[in-house]
Amino acid sequence: MLTHTAEQAAYEGARRGSMPGATAKLARSAAQEELDRLGIRDATIFIQPSVITSATARLTVEVHIPLSSNAWVPPQVLRNATIKRQCSLSREYIASE
């Protein structure tokens, strides 16, 4: 479940960030909304590039979920274990005529 959530959050963030006019803040918010739906705690979201411009061709969103804060196994067993997933998408452009 945590792996799927990390993958979905990365995809949703990348999808939102790939749209014309998007910002890294909007991409991060979309990823965070997915994590919040399942109550994922202490996740970290990385957006590359950190500033999206009209010249940005590709966007990558990476999500890290610490198992010590989110798994059903005692934290001693999962010391420093993290699920990491990322999604990279090409940016969408509006064709001018």
Image (cartoon, rainbow, N blue to C red):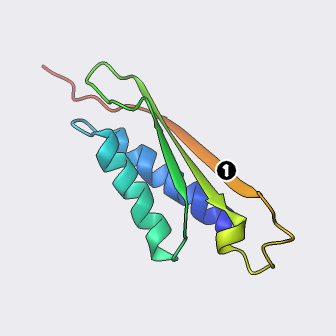
Q: Is residue 1 visible?
A: no
Q: Residue furthest right?
A: 77
**Residue 24 placement (x, y as % from top left):** 34, 40
* Residue 66 shows in this picture: yes
Q: Is residue 30 above or below residue 5?
A: above
Q: Is residue 80 left or right of residue 35?
A: right
Residue positioned 59% across, 44% down in the render: 86
Reading the image, the residue beneath label 1 is 84
Q: Amino acid at mark 1?
A: Lys
Q: Is residue 20 above or below residue 63?
A: above
x then y, percent, for residue 12: 44, 54
| Horizontal side, residue 63 vs residue 84: left or right | left
Q: Quadrant of the C terminus?
A: top left
The quadrant holding residue 78 is bottom right
Q: Secondary structure at mark 1?
A: strand
Q: Residue lying farthest left?
A: 97
Counting from the top left corner in percent of width and height, residue 47 is at 45, 39
Task: Between residue 77 and residue 94, name the one nearer to us.
Answer: 77
Q: Compare residues 86 and 25 and report the one nearer the observer.
A: 25
* Quadrant for the N terminus in the image: bottom right
Residue drawn at x 55%, y 64% is 42
Label 1 environment density (alpha carbons within 10 Å; few <14, some 14–19, many ≥20): some
Quarter of the view holding residue 37: bottom left
Residue located 53% across and 53% down the image: 44
